[in-house]
Image (tube, rainbow, N blue to C red):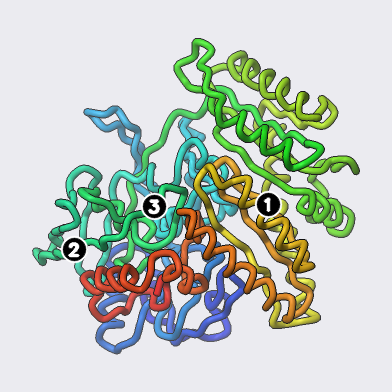
């Protein structure tokens, strides 16, 4: 199996020592399996020679989860098979099997040719499906469709001893917090799930556990610490017959927050079987718009972003999916009427009703994090130790406004440059602090830690979608406490007693 030789980590493979977190790790060897048998072979070889294994996909994560800490890199990017779409007999659901190296863009193209749609939408369409499942990725459309977890119907997993588990939703349930699984080789794996209660917010922090839970969900979002995912069965739905995107520019944040509340309340059916609750509600503060204005002037990479007029202060992007243009048009008209009462005008709105028109709106939505990364890369040339500080926290609904006020006031008091954007429909905003110096970085980090403590105090999550990885492990303790994290470690040891899979992730 030539593709599965443990190759020495030389200069040809240096790129695989990093991911989008900008961290750089170390490794001795790397392999590129093309099927499950080669994954098992690589794991067994590493067990013989000793060392740990870091599992990688396309390395689009930003919390360092794919950055190796010595040992072996198991890169699944060449496991690219997409199976035939099947219709489940009882439920009528449309299902497809994919291998973990399939990219989101590849699955979307495949589904679109069949008139189908896969809703999870992280910013990077180059994300691999294995990575999306391992981190329970979400994105803008999770406001309506939920995270990747909602679309996974079965998994195949290789454990750290080379044994395999086939998990199908509905077939393996916990009994309270006790669980038992049988590998295909006949080994019984049993134990007790951690006792903590998950926060009632959007969250990707730590293991998903609940009473009587489906054990498929234990592996989704486990960040590669329990096993290596080698096959994923996903649910597809018919592509929406009509789509509309609306970017509305408002005179201040207060108006934007009132519009968010209105958009959340909009669920009138207008006689259509599909509720017209928006599928996405995204926020961009004035600093984010100013950064995009600057980048559009300075970098050709942002040439496709529509021009932002000087008086545009705060922006909301919302998207509707429905069965007809007429139904969506009715919803959009009501949104526009409300927005105009908040100070917007027709001239302060970008409206799109087809894929071609939606492209610049989506480019605008994704441009802010790209602009932040470009700016930080520029500053790193002057100060090599510099990185951005990006929050990923969510709060309960009643704390949205007070949390945004907290961010604004304390950033202003600290004199730190920043942008705020993200998934405001889920009370999930990204604050990106943009330091110029290491002293500013240290001040920003202290501010971030202070916010995290207060977010946890009100029942929020320290990581709503990016996971914990290696960068945010201290936040996991802050959120759940030492005892609960100890229970997570105990759970991990049940599946991976030697701790060879993805060391440093979560703990």
Label 1 neighbourhood size at 10 Å, few (<14), some (14-19), many (20+)? few
Callout 3: SS: loop
Q: Earlier in the sequence, mark 2 or mark 3?
A: 3
Q: Compared to 355, does 336 lie above or below? A: above
- What label sits on residue 81 in the rendered view? 3
Q: CA distance from mark 1 to mark 3?
A: 47 Å
Q: Quadrant of the C terminus?
A: bottom left
The span from disc 2 to disc 1 (Cα, nearest Å) is 41 Å
Q: In the orientation shown, which residue stands out farthest toward the top?
A: 271
Residue 468: image location, x then y, percent: 47, 66
> On the picture, is 158 further left or further right than 149?
left
At 26% from the left edge and 81% from the top edge, which residue is drawn?
498
Question: Which disc, if any, is residue 29?
Answer: none
Front residue of 482/147: it is 482
Front residue of 424 and 53: 424
Residue at figure coordinates x 76%, y 24% from the top left? 341
Question: What is the C-alpha distance between the residues marked 2 and 3?
Answer: 35 Å
Q: Secondary structure at mark 2?
A: strand
Residue 357: name its quadrant.
Answer: top right
Image position, residue 330 (x, y; %): 63, 15
Image x and y of residue 442, in percent: 67, 78
Left or right placement of residue 214 versus residue 461 in this view: left
Q: Residue at x 65, y 32 (%)?
A: 355
Name the residue beneath numbered marker 1: 405
Nearer to us of marks 1 and 3 is 1
Crowd tier of the residue under label 3, counting other residues whose Cα lies within 10 Å: few below 14, some 14–19, many 20 or above: some
Please report the residue visible at 61 percent of the width from the left and 33 percent of the height from the top.
261
Circles 1 and 3: CB distance less than 8 Å?
no
Instruction: Provide the residue designation for mark 2.
Output: 192
Residue 292 is situated, as x and y percent measured from the top left of the image, at 80, 52
Q: Name the secondary structure under disc 1.
A: helix
Q: Viewer-nearest of labels 2 and 1?
A: 1
């Amino acid at each position: 199996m030539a593709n599965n030789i443990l190759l020495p980590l030389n200069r040809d493979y240096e790129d695989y020592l990093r991911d989008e977190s900008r961290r750089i790790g170390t490794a001795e060897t790397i392999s590129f399996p093309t099927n499950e048998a080669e994954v098992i072979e690589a794991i067994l070889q590493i067990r013989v020679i000793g060392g740990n294994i870091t599992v990688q996909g396309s390395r689009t994560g930003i919390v360092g989860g794919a950055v190796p800490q010595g040992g072996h890199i198991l890169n699944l990017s060449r496991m690219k098979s997409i199976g035939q779409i099947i219709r489940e007999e009882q439920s009528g659901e449309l299902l497809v099997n994919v291998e973990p190296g399939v990219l989101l863009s590849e699955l979307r193209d495949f589904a679109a040719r069949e008139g189908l749609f896969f809703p999870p939408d992280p910013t990077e369409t180059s994300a691999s499906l294995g990575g999306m499942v391992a981190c329970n990725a979400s994105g803008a459309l999770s406001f309506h469709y939920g995270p990747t977890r909602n679309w996974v119907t079965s998994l195949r997993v290789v454990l750290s001893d080379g044994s395999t588990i086939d998990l199908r939703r509905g077939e393996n349930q916990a009994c309270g917090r006790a669980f038992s699984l049988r590998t295909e080789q006949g080994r019984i794996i049993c134990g007790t799930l951690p006792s903590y209660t998950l926060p009632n917010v959007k969250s990707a922090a730590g293991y998903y556990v609940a009473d009587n839970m489906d054990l498929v969900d234990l592996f989704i979002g486990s960040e590669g610490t329990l096993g290596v995912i080698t096959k994923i069965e996903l649910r597809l739905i018919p592509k929406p017959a009509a789509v509309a995107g609306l970017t509305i520019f408002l005179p201040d944040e207060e108006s934007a927050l009132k519009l968010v509340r209105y958009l959340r309340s909009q669920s009138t059916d207008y006689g259509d079987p599909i509720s017209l609750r928006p599928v996405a509600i995204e926020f961009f503060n004035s600093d984010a718009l100013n950064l995009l204005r600057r980048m559009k002037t300075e970098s050709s990479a942002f040439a496709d972003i529509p021009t932002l007029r000087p008086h545009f202060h705060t922006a909301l992007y919302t998207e509707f999916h429905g069965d007809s243009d007429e139904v969506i048009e009715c919803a959009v008209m009501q949104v526009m009427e409300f927005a105009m009462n908040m100070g917007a005008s027709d001239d302060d709105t970008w409206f799109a009703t087809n894929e071609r028109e939606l492209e610049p709106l989506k480019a605008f939505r994704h441009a802010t994090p790209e602009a932040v990364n470009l700016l930080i890369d520029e500053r790193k040339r002057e100060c090599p130790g510099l990185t951005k500080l990006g929050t990923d926290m969510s709060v309960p609904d009643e704390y949205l406004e007070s949390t945004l006020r907290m961010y604004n006031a304390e950033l202003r008091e600290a004199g730190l440059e920043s942008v705020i954007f993200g998934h405001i429909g889920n009370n999930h905003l990204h604050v990106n602090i943009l330091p110029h110096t290491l002293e500013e970085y240290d001040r920003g980090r202290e501010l971030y830690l202070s916010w995290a403590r207060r977010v946890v105090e009100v029942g929020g999550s320290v990581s709503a979608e990016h996971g914990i990885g290696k960068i945010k492990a201290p936040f996991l303790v802050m959120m759940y406490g030492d005892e609960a994290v100890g229970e997570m470690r105990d759970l991990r040891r049940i599946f991976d007693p030697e701790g060879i899979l993805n060391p440093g992730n979560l703990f």
